[in-house]
Amino acid sequence: MWKRAFSTAAVGAAAAVFRRPCLSGTRRASTLSSAVNSMLLRSLKEHYLEVAKMTMPPKIGPPPPFAIVKGALDSHGPVLKRSYGDEEISIYVTRLVSGMDDESSEIDQLFVHVDVSKPGQEESLIFLCGLYEDALGIHSVSMRPKDHDAAYIVLPTQYVGPTFEELDERTRDAFHNYLEERGINESLFKFLQAWLYVKDHRNLVRWFKTMGLFIDGKKPPQDDA
Ligand SMILES: *[C@@H]1O[C@H](CO)[C@@H](O)[C@H](O)[C@H]1NC(C)=O
């Protein structure tokens, strides 16, 4: 329910913001610009208030032993971490298809990247996966320098390994078991899906707010959101 309400409001909000203002070309530039500004500001504020009071999904915790990375909502970094023996496992999540402006854009598939690091090793093992409510699919497995930028994963500049489907079944199963053993499976879906909604909502609220403040000529406060 909240999913639909959320995406509809986002569409309405975007449509309202981008509606073409009708202005007479004979007015003086300064009058024009202040009329445009106040119209835009009013619109931004209206939608800011509307979006800010939207109900968010009930808070759910991550499946143990995963823990939420502090500040993850405001970063591009990992969302979840856990240790496994001497390994550190980090999970990043994004939408498989981005954009909320499609009516059918309920998030039903997530793009997850799993990073397995070991002390004393310069590279980490990276799994790129599609995560669904009832399944986890591996797209690729590769080695990347530790502490890479998350954008590096999306636009890799080096060999990313063979196409996963080209590997023989036994090897593919073994990789699936490797992840399963580390607690990475479809049970993470519900949490990551809800987390992404909260993040999207936060970004949308901030979008209305910072843009309004900019147009109004004010500086955004440091403790944003
Ligand atoms: C996923 O992994 C967790 C932790 O190992 C396990 O408790 C859970 O049963 C698994 N879920 C499924 C659907 O296999």
Image (tube, rainbow, N blue to C red):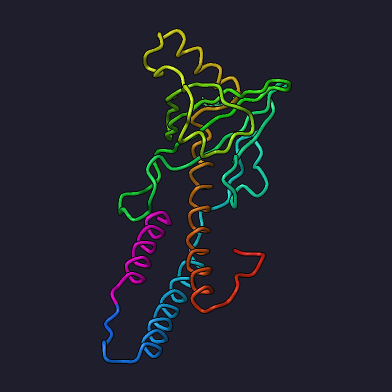
Q: Is residue 31 above or below residue 220?
A: below
Q: Quadrant of the N terminus?
A: bottom left
User: Does the magenta run of residues contain 16?
Assistant: yes
User: Between residues 200 and 181, which one lies in front from this camera angle?
Assistant: 200
Q: Residue at x 47, y 76 (%)?
A: 45
User: Does the magenta run of residues contain 85?
Assistant: no
Residue 102 picture location, percent across and down: 31, 53
Q: Number of numbered discs present?
A: 0
Residue 10 picture location, percent across and down: 39, 62
User: Between residues 69 and 41, which one lies in front from this camera angle?
Assistant: 41
Q: Residue at x 38, y 67 (%)?
A: 13
The image quadrant that residue 14 belongs to is: bottom left
Dominant SS type (magenta) = helix
Q: Quadrant of the C terminus?
A: bottom right
The quadrant where ligand 1 appears is top right
Q: Is residue 18 above or below residue 3?
A: below
The answer to whether 50 appears left or right of 102 in the picture is right
Q: Is residue 99 above or below residue 36?
A: above
Q: Residue at x 53, y 68 (%)?
A: 210
Residue 127 picture location, percent across and down: 51, 25
Residue 184 picture location, percent across and down: 55, 27
The image quadrant that residue 23 belongs to is: bottom left
The image quadrant that residue 110 belongs to is: top left
Residues drawn in magenta: 1-20
Q: Is residue 225 above or below residue 30?
A: above
